[in-house]
Amino acid sequence: MVIEKRAALATLTTPVATGGFRLQFDNPEEIELVRESVAFFEQLARRHDIGLTHQGYLFVSRTADGQRQLQTMGRRMMGWGVDVELMDGEDACRRFPYLAPDVNAGRFGRQDGWLDSRRLALALAAESGADFALEVAGMGFLRQGDRVTGVQTTAGKVSAPWTVVATGPLSGPLLATVGLDPGLTTVRRHKLIVPNLPLVPQDAPMTIEVETGAHWRPGLRGAFGLWTAPAPAEPPAADVPTSADFAFGLLNPQSDHALARVAPFWREAWASPRLQWWLQAGQYTYTPDRRPLLGPSRLEGLAINTGYSGHGIMGSIGGSRRAVDAILGRLSPDANPFRPDRPMVPRAFDVL
């Protein structure tokens, strides 16, 4: 049974996500997590229209340090079995002619891409066989000593041998009610929506500037724009406000992280009377080491599936399968690098 406080599924952080997935990670464990998810997406797309496309992720640099970082990580990924292409600036601009002439390197992953995140969620719900209790709020956990035996809800008690906390940015406060503190922090993230903009090449990959983390991908006959630079932690919220400063930071060519830095057509878009945009905002739920929490907690009967640190869509399938296997004893703690009680080595935000 899935207990959902809202009137519909997948209406908090899921629709704010851009639905991107990539195998370009800085560690083999998360690569395998996403690889499993992508294989499942491809199977699911044969039965449901989830907007799946493999247009790739293109990381580009404009400085010597960025070029070094991009290429070093690319060679590591190749060693982990990731299909990536390394290009110098001339090759990158020839392959992707919308790029600025001062781009000095590129790294392209053809297996990467995106999908419609809410369509994915609803397809999973349709095939799950689960019962969904909508507009039912959890009021607290049922307990017998140190064991969690279910949930007290606004519709009554729900007993279960296992209760799984999978509440995204609201996970931290919920776990705190039973004395658990996995060190989760929530950070506001925006999505800039620029529809119906013919200047955007609709066959382009997700394009990311290594130096700033600003990126965009085609969508809605225009584009979605993002920027995931370090930001202060904020309290978890069900309704996350937006700020016009985010849009100006990406669209204004004078900004130090403008999209026009690596794709000059955005400069023309900024000056166009056809430019229209709006914003959505949600929250990333970060763990100290930027990897998810998957599996049983130290309280018997309570498991965790959260803390994907901005990679929830792409890690959802592989992560949830590991959480279930850990609950059922098919995955031992020693074989689970994402177990909630693992030693945490803090990792700073990084653009691959």
Image: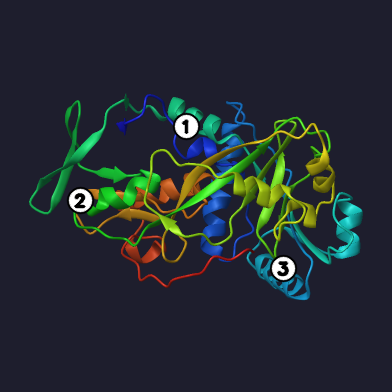
- Identify the mark at residue 352; answer none if there is no mark: none
Residue 239: quadrant of the picture: top left
Residue that carries the numbered disc 2 in the rendered image:
177
Task: Determine whether label 3 and label 2 are within 8 Å by CB.
Answer: no
Image point 24% across, 58% down: which residue? 180
Examine the rendering and report whether any part of residue 143 can be seen: yes
Residue at point 91% right, 63% down?
Answer: 90
Q: Is residue 292 visible?
A: no
| Three-letter code, disc 2 | Thr
Q: How many numbered callouts?
A: 3
- Assign a secondary structure to mark 1: helix
Q: Residues within 10 Å of mark 3 (few under 14, many from 20)?
A: many
Q: Label 3, label 1: how many angstroms apart (C-alpha)?
A: 35 Å
Marks 1 and 2, how far apart at CA: 29 Å
> Where residue 103 sits: x, y (%)?
83, 63
Q: Which disc number belongs to residue 124? A: 1
> Which one is in front in this view, the residue at disc 3 or the one at disc 2?
2
Kindly identify the amino acid type of the residue bearing the numbered disc 1: Leu
Nearer-the-camera pick, 76 or 188: 188
Say which element carries label 2: loop
Mark 1 vs mark 2: in front: 2
Residue 109, position as x, y percentages in the image: 72, 54
Q: Which residue is mark 3?
A: 70
Label 3 secondary element: helix
